[in-house]
Image: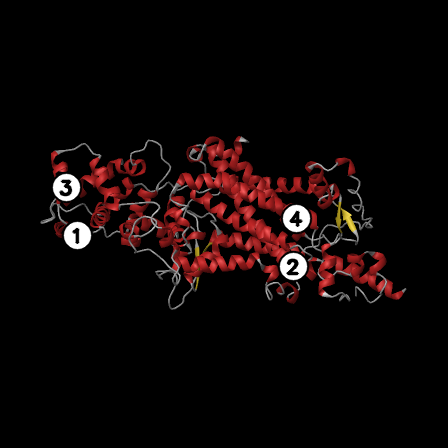
């Protein structure tokens, strides 16, 4: 870690440790910081749709995945052989780690999926670094404070990118073509991430976590969840935050990514039949695709 | 660009492998660049803005800042009138905070799972742990031996002595008719001001602990009774953290909080005739609303109108404008042949 990044006071270049400005319109009340985050997210979404994507050369589709995995009789009838055939059938290497993708995947809005993964990687790495030295380390160590800051901003970016990804996929109707499970796993990941982030806020061991734990217990109790998950039990919140929930989130996010690889990126709504059927069949009728 | 495929045919075809034109792509390169971009952004944001870390409130700070406020809360614990004493499941058999949605009350269903006896846990047991002076021992014995009616009379007398005083003022010199209460409350206040009560409430007889339920419930009882005048309430209100201030979205200082909780907290803020923020069943109502909405988001692909909106508001034409332009040009080319 570059020493220059870590100030001895734990403060950043810009001191945000003062009361925020709040905007009040009717029943709406929002802090400047939250307003800026939401405004940036909306701006990124609009820019991602509006800005022209990088130029690329269109390649003919040779459908080279067909038959790649057909000859696997040598695997025999063992369960490992059957599992291998099953895996190759649904996820051949050129789907798992492709070197081409459909030409229509040409918009900046697509980058928010992989940026979400990038955010998740950073959340996990910084979380692991915090875990090494324990939950109280960051309160009295400038380096610890910096790692905690990285963890916080990773979470803000992860959640922000995921929300923009979700907006984009909604407007693409990305569940089309038997991709409903891809959508469902994505939304599940979003919901689990919200709960995971919440347990992180409970685990800060500061004023914020203290208040959130007390205030949220009524909702937990009202729903009956409080009988099993007590937000004022710091140990329980921390263990959920660093073990069970990350595991669940990683499994769901992994499943989501695998489903995207298996089903492919959803084709454009109203895509021409020549692209869906193949050039020979789709181009027979000149009316089709107009 | 309307094809001659039925909806069912189109759905079948959209599920199979893409047969149209491709472009070069390197998934590992893309992932590496994405992680790199996030790393740079995270380093930059952490360097420029750091992160919030306002220290937690202690019972010691509270007792030092508001001796009367602290003692009023302790008295309510002994009297059994505090929020925690009357809360209901999962802490005890009260009903003050028990919520239901029609006939359904999950709290009652699961019963008392985290037993809390407020008078014992917050006042009597901590006092019993102090080095026993004859006066304190006598006061504890006197309270334990008193009838309910006698305790009520003592509590009423102590409440008269404490009422009308500023929360930050010192305890009254005398409380006529309050029996052992001035001694009990005075000793508890001294214990809290020394910091010993913080340790006692967290430890509860154990060396290792990670559970802060009891000190938080005790501290929270002051907030429930005295609201924004309480020590904790003053800090929370100033920080815009109250639920009526969209608090779950907010963070201490000027950092962004959890803006993704906007929809959850919005239901508490709606200016209706019976706002959910003051409804006795507000939390369970909001939970029910959010459960339905989460389920709806999960099942968007199967819900008419929700799944049709992207077709009616064709933002996708912008997203795939390059594809549509090329497809139109190719179709035009085929038509002219």
Q: Residues within 10 Å of mark 4 (few under 14, many from 20)?
A: many
- Name the residue rendered at 48%, 58% in the picture: B290
Q: Nearer the viewer, residue B25 or B42?
A: B25
SS at mark 3?
A: helix
Residue ID for mark 1: B159
Between the residue at mark 3 and the residue at mark 1, the CA separation in whole angstroms equals 14 Å
Q: CA distance from mark 1 to mark 2?
A: 64 Å
What is the residue that sits farthest to the right in this orientation? Answer: B337
Vertical order, B332 against A205 (above or below): below
Inspect this view and state whether residue B236 appears.
Answer: yes
Of all chains, the one bearing label 2 is A
* Image position, residue B184 (x, y; %): 17, 42
Residue B270 versus residue B220 in the image, above or below: below
Are the residues under marks 3 and 1 on the same chain?
yes
Is B335 positioned to the left or the right of B39 in the image?
A: right
Of the numbered discs in the image, which one, if any, rests on residue A173?
2
The residue beneath circle 4 is A259
Residue at 73 percent of width and 38 percent of height = A77
Q: Is residue A29 visible?
A: no
Q: Are marks 4 and 2 on the same chain?
A: yes
Badge 3 is on which residue?
B183
**Quarter of the figure with residue A235:** top left
Q: What secondary structure is marked by label 2?
A: loop
- In the rendered structure, find residue A223 and report the number of the disc placed on it: none
Residues tagged 1 and 4 counted as in contact (Cβ below 8 A): no
> Are the residues under marks 4 and 3 on the same chain?
no
How far apart, in angstroms, are the residues tagged by discs 3 and 2? 70 Å
Q: Are marks 1 and 4 on the same chain?
A: no
Which percent across, then down, holds residue B140? 15, 40
Q: Circle 4 — which element?
A: helix
């Amino acid at each position: 870690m570059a020493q220059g990044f870590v100030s001895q006071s734990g403060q950043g270049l810009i001191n945000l440790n003062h009361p925020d400005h709040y905007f009040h319109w009717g029943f709406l009340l929002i802090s400047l910081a939250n307003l800026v985050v939401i405004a940036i997210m909306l701006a990124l979404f609009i820019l991602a749709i509006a800005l022209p994507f990088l130029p690329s050369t269109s390649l003919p589709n040779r459908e080279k995945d067909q038959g790649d995995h057909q000859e696997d009789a040598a695997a025999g009838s063992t369960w490992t052989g059957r599992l291998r055939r099953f895996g190759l059938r649904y996820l051949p290497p050129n789907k798992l780690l492709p070197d081409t993708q459909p030409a229509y995947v040409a918009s900046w809005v697509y980058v928010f999926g992989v940026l979400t993964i990038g955010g998740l990687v950073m959340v996990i790495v910084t979380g692991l670094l915090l875990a090494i030295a324990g939950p109280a380390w960051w309160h009295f160590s400038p380096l610890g404070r910096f790692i905690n800051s990285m963890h916080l901003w990773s979470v803000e970016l992860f959640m922000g990118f995921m929300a923009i990804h979700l907006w984009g996929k909604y407007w693409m109707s990305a569940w089309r073509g038997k991709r409903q499970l891809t959508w469902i796993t994505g939304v599940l990941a979003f919901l689990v991430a919200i709960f995971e982030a919440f347990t992180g806020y409970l685990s800060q061991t500061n004023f914020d976590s203290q208040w959130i734990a007390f205030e949220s217990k009524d909702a937990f109790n009202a729903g009956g969840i409080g009988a099993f998950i007590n937000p004022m039990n710091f140990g329980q919140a921390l263990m959920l935050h660093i073990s069970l929930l990350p595991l669940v989130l990683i499994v769901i996010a992994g499943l989501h990514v695998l489903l995207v690889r298996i089903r492919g990126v959803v084709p454009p709504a109203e895509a021409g039949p020549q692209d869906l059927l193949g050039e020979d069949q789709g181009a027979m009728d000149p009316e089709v695709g107009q | 660009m309307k094809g001659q495929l039925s909806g069912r045919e189109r759905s079948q075809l959209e599920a199979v492998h893409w047969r149209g034109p491709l472009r070069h792509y390197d998934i590992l390169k893309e992932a590496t660049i994405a992680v790199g971009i996030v790393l740079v952004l995270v380093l930059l944001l952490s360097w420029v803005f750091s992160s919030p870390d306002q220290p937690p409130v202690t019972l010691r700070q509270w007792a030092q800042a508001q001796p009367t406020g602290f003692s009023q809360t302790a008295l309510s614990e002994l009297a059994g009138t505090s929020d925690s004493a009357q809360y209901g499941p999962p802490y005890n058999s009260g009903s003050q905070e028990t919520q239901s949605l029609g006939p359904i009350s999950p709290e009652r269903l699961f019963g008392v799972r985290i037993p809390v006896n407020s008078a014992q846990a917050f006042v009597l047991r901590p006092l019993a742990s102090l080095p026993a002076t004859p006066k304190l021992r006598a006061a504890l014995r006197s309270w334990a031996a008193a009838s309910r009616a006698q305790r009520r009379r003592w509590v009423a007398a102590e409440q008269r002595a404490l009422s009308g005083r500023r929360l930050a003022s010192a305890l009254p010199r005398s409380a006529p008719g309050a029996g052992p209460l001035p001694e009990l409350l005075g000793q508890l206040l001294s214990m809290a001001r020394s910091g010993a009560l913080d340790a006692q409430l967290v430890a509860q007889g154990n060396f290792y602990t990670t559970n802060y339920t009891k000190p938080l419930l005790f501290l929270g009882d002051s907030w429930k009774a005295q609201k924004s005048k309480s020590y904790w309430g003053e800090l929370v209100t100033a920080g815009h953290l109250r639920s009526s201030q969209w608090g779950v979205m907010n963070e201490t200082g000027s950092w962004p909080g959890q803006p993704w909780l906007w929809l959850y907290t919005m239901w508490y803020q709606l200016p209706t005739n019976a706002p959910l923020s003051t409804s006795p069943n507000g939390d369970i109502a909001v939970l029910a609303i959010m459960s339905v909405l989460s389920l709806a988001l999960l099942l968007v692909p199967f819900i008419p109108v929700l799944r049709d909106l992207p077709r009616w508001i064709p933002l996708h034409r912008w997203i795939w404008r390059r594809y549509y332009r090329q497809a139109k040009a190719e179709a035009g080319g085929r038509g002219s042949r």
